[in-house]
Image (tube, rainbow, N blue to C red):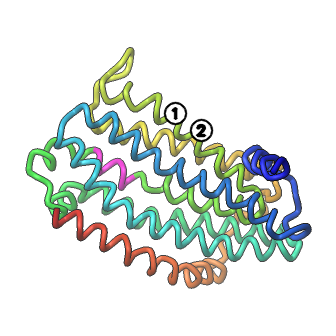
Amino acid sequence: MKSFFRDVAEAVSGTEQDFTEGKLSRAILLLSIPAVLEMVMESIFVITDIFFVSKLGADAIATVGLTESMITIIYAIAIGLGTATTSMVSRRIGEKHPDSASKAAFQAIFTGLVVSLLIGIPGALYAGKLLGLMGASQPIINEMSGYTRIMLGGNVVIMMLFIINAIFRSAGDAAVAMKVLWIGNIINIILDPCLIFGLGPFPEMGVTGAAIATNIGRGTAVMVQFYLLFFGSKRIRLSVKHISIDFKVMFKLLKLSFGSIGQNLIGTTSWIALVRII
């Protein structure tokens, strides 16, 4: 039992173990605990927004709920790309080719940036119409679509969190992926009430403030991710030589992700339909 709790503590704090060696059961434990906590951290972003926004009334809660239902599509795509990234990077790590792993990691990041741009531009431009399609009332569309516009337009931070965390997990640095989300959540929890209600020197922005706080929190976590990728001492490192576009690798990444994206989209589409009916 003591060894179990010792392994749990090591999983949370981070480990330097080579997962290609040693007991498989221990490797699974060390990787799975941070992964589970990472998903918990991601859900706290939404819980925090709803908690503070609930003080603004039913329309504000509806805005967050309707927007999050649309963002589940982004989650589905991000998870799919993350799964493909895990497949490509972990294979190179297992083959003891860290340079090839770094090259694959950059292609995954660049692919995520392109996909998020294709989603973000129309999402920001047509935020009000998308809320209308989801059944939002006219007051919500007129007064609160700023939340949806910022969340959809800033989807790149969600995409990067999933993809770069997949890179860290693939290299066996699962605890790093979890800890960057701690940073993002702490910032979001602090900024949410400040920007929503105008505490201290901050402007009162209502539900739009929640979107700004969330994107700042996630964006800060992404900046920490990039710093660790380029300047950290983890198993995988990026440098200038890895910054090049390889369409062959990108297409392979997209091909690998289609299955996972399709499976996730089935569930998210059903959820969006249910929300629209309600």
Disc sitting over residue 73 in the figure? none
Please report the bounds of the magenta region as a residue range. 147-153
Q: To which quarter of the image does residue 255 belong?
A: bottom right
Counting from the top left corner in percent of width and height, residue 247 is at: 62, 79
Q: Residue at x 68, y 55 (%)?
A: 33
Counting from the top left corner in percent of width and height, residue 269 is at: 32, 73
- How crowded pointer 2 is (Cα within 10 Å; few <14, some 14-19, many 20+) is rated as some
Q: What is the magenta segment's predominant secondary structure? A: helix
Q: To which quarter of the image does residue 205 belong?
A: top left
CA gap, disc 1 to disc 2? Answer: 6 Å
Q: Residue at x 30, y 25 (%)?
A: 197
In the image: residue 149, left or right of residue 141: right
C-beta proximity under 8 Å, tags 1 and 2: yes
Counting from the top left corner in percent of width and height, residue 59 is at: 17, 43
Mark 2: secondary structure? helix
**Foreground residue among 219 and 87:** 87
Query: Is 148 inside the magenta-drawn segment?
Result: yes
Q: Quadrant of the C terminus?
A: bottom left
Q: Which residue occupies the extreme top position in the image? A: 200
Hey, what amino acid is under mark 1?
Answer: Ile
Q: Residue at x 70, y 45 (%)?
A: 227
Residue on which the image places disc 2: 183
- How crowded pointer 1 is (Cα within 10 Å; few <14, some 14-19, many 20+) is rated as some
Residue on which the image places disc 1: 187
Counting from the top left corner in percent of width and height, residue 140 is at: 15, 46
Hey, what amino acid is under mark 2?
Answer: Ile
Mark 1: secondary structure? helix
Q: Which residue occupies the extreme front position in the image? A: 1
In the image: residue 124, left or right of residue 220: left
Q: To which quarter of the image does residue 266 belong?
A: bottom left
Q: Residue at x 37, y 21 (%)?
A: 202
Query: Is 56 inside the magenta-drawn segment?
Result: no
